[in-house]
Structures are given as structure tokens and as C-alpha cells.
Amino acid sequence: METHEVSAVLLSLGVASLAVLLSLPFGLWCGWILARKRFPGKTLFEAIVFLPLVLPPIVTGFFLLYVLGPETGLGKLLNIDFLFTWRALVVAAAVVGFPLMVRPIRAAIEDIDQGLEEAARTLGHSRWQTLKLVTLPLARRGILGGSVLAFARALGEFGATVMVASNLPGERTLALEIFNQAAVPGTDELVMRLALISVALSILALVVSELLLARHTRDAR
């Protein structure tokens, strides 16, 4: 592979990994809230969490322009440049992959016998200790499966990314590199190679996710 191909693969893997690490604490919290809590507005909260699943990615990217903007959002609040940097790549990938992380986590927590959690509470454990010692270990395969699904989605993200990320050589993910190279005459072989790499990585992530979720389902029975 040429240098820019290697760069695109490594950047995609790095962005997807950071996106999962960034979103995992929020995914655990949302999964637990949706599985265990009842509160006014829960349906609306759930709709917002899963909105990126049905919203066109380009629309998600459009809103991220404002959320990450230097004068309108996190850029101003934190005094950090987000737009057209690797940070924007990570945030965009995290947002689009988030619903796919939350669903398996929610399902795994719902499958846990609440009697086990109540038993831990009667033994003097706090809510946080019960979560750490009982809930999360029992939901671990759902957490791993959701993380792998989010990784796979982040790996192939394009629509939101193209709105907020740089399009300079060396700063493109696999999806952005494929898009740019496809517009250049005589690069069919390169584009096919990048596409096959993307397919292989995505299939590997999906297979791992399915194996984890299937094993969790067997254990739950």
C-alpha cells in the first residue's frame, strides 16, 4: 500500500477507537437509564438517543457544524479548535455510532435479574458499587458487542464526517479517501483496494460483535 493508503487506514482505526472510548461512558449511562428507570419524557429521551440511526448523516454533520463551531458551540465553550481537525472526526464518528452502542448495552442490562442487584444492595453495597460489581460484569458481553458495533459504524462514517473534517491528503479517513480517489481518473484499482480493506475491517468487526452477542444470549438462558 502507498503512504496515503496506510495513513487513511491508520487514521480510520484511530478515530474509530477514540470514538468508542469517548462515547462508552455515555453509552453505559444511557443504556442503564433506559433499562432501569422510568421518568417523564423517557420516550423523548430515547428518541433523541437513537435519532442518529434514522437521521441522514449529512444532517447530523450540519448540526455538528454548530455544536463544534468556534463561535457557537463547544469550540467557544472549551476554547478548542474542533472543526476540520481530527477532533471533529472523532466526535462525528462517536455521534453516529452511539445508538448502535446503546442498544446492546440496554438489552444486556434488561436481561439481568434485578433480584441480584437488590441482593447486593441489601448486603450494604451502594448503588455505584452494585453497578460496578454486579450490573456491569453481568452485562459485559452486551457492552463489548455494542462497542464493537459502534467501532464498525465509526470506521465507515462518511456523511457527518465530510461536513466537519479536513479534506487534505493525510487527514482523510478511509471513507473520505475513497470518495476523493473515486473522482480521479485512472484510480479504479486504488479505490477497489481501499474499498476491500474497508469491507474486510467492517466484516471482522461485525463478526466479533455477533459472536459476543450470541454468547451473551446463550448465557442469559
Image (tube, rainbow, N blue to C red):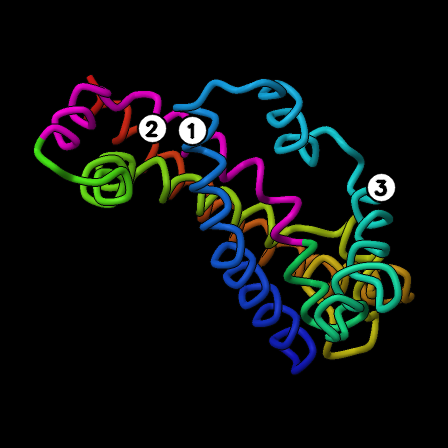
Q: Dividing the picture into quarters, in which one does residue 116 lie? A: top left
Q: Position of residue 73 (x, y in %)?
A: 80, 59
Residue for badge 3? 59
Q: Give me the residue at 77% from left, 50% from top.
A: 160
Q: Whole-Å distance between the Cαs marked 2 and 1? A: 5 Å
Q: Dot 1, crowdedness within 10 Å: few (<14), some or many (≥20)? A: many
Q: Is residue 123 above or below residue 10?
A: above
Residue range in magenta is: 93-122
Q: Amino acid at mark 2?
A: Ile
Whether the residues at callouts 2 and 1 have beta carbons within 8 Å, the answer is yes
Residue 107 falls within the magenta-colored stretch: yes
Residue for badge 2? 109
Q: Position of residue 36 (x, y in %)?
A: 39, 23
Q: Is residue 35 above or below residue 92?
A: above
Q: Amino acid at mark 3?
A: Val
Q: Is residue 47 above or below residue 78?
A: above
Q: Whole-Å distance between the Cαs marked 2 and 3? A: 31 Å
Residue for badge 1? 106
